[in-house]
Amino acid sequence: MESLATSTGGKPTGVHYSCLCNLVEQLGNVVPYTRNTKGSRHIKSSIGLVEIGGSGYCRSPVVLCTLFGMGQARAHDLAPGWTLALAGGLVAGTLDITYAGVFWALRAGATLQRILQSVAKGLLGPAAYLGGAATAALGLLLHYFIATSMSLIYFLVAQRWTALRERPLRYGPAYGLLLYTIMNYVVVPLSAARGGGSGGALWIALSIVVHMLLIGVPIAIFTNCAFRAASQKLAQST
């Protein structure tokens, strides 16, 4: 195995890849390949690497050199991003459960344990209210699992749709509204809970606002920070 500093178009990338070179029978000149941006096919061009399925390579009749690890390098560069995306879910989940706790404490005198049990009700049904602290802990775990999943999904989609990470204040509220719709009209009706608390119009209105501003926006902002951190790390390595 050999470590090489690769280049594309004569410009060093600053990233080292593991290189496995196998001699082939024929002799000849190096035939460089590069990626055709208009499609999945690859054409002869200036000296560079081809990227296929996360791996890069350059080919010649003399040497077949396969460079593994482009996908792994990208994942490594995004490592701070994953951490920030998870943090975004934790922040959004904390704001959401705080809102629910305050609202139901003022509205019905409900305890935090009762509220968390109502989350576990989605998995256990009415039996969740009989489990004491254990089912409350399960509800808390489920709550943060859902919140971090929401954040990671946004982060993953933002890797493809750059506007999501570049304009968090525009797309964050829209994502929060989408989450509210999915949770209340798909997830909850299909769960063992089969419905939420009867908070009336005030609960519905506030919940929509909370999903847009206290869930969607933090998730989008942390995603924005995640990609900024990944870009800075990549810049430092070049």
Image: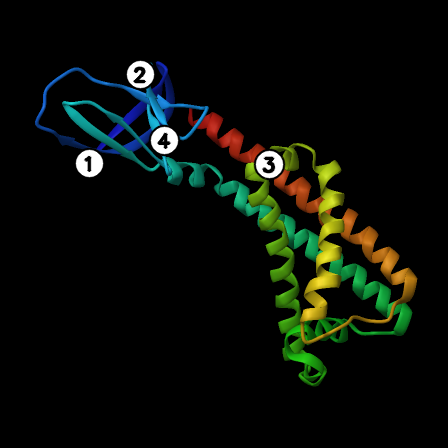
Mark 1 neighbour density, 10 Å: few (under 14) some (14–19) many (20 or more):
few
Q: Which residue is mark 2?
A: 47
Mark 3–mark 4 contact, CB under 8 Å?
no
| Quarter of the picture holding the C terminus | top left
Mark 1–mark 3 contact, CB under 8 Å?
no
Please give left or right for residue 228 compared with residue 191 in the image: left
User: Given the image, on which type of amino acid does mark 3 rest?
Assistant: Trp
Residue at x-position 10% and y-position 20%: 27
- Image quadrant where residue 47 sits: top left
Label 2: state its secondary structure.
loop
x and y percentages locating residue 180 in the rendered image: 75, 56
Q: Which residue is mark 3?
A: 161
Q: CA distance from mark 4 to mark 2?
A: 13 Å
Q: Earlier in the sequence, mark 1 or mark 4?
A: 1
| Quarter of the picture holding the N terminus | top left
Please give left or right for residue 3 compared with residue 92 in the image: left
Label 4: state its secondary structure.
strand
Q: Earlier in the sequence, mark 3 or mark 4?
A: 4
Asked if 56 appears above or below 191 in the picture, the reply is: above
x and y percentages locating residue 218 in the rendered image: 70, 45
User: Given the image, on which type of amino acid does mark 2 rest?
Assistant: Ile
Q: CA distance from mark 1 to mark 3?
A: 36 Å
x and y percentages locating residue 124 in the rendered image: 64, 79
Q: Which residue is mark 1?
A: 1
Mark 1–mark 4 contact, CB under 8 Å?
no
Q: Which residue is mark 4?
A: 51
Mark 2 neighbour density, 10 Å: few (under 14) some (14–19) many (20 or more):
some
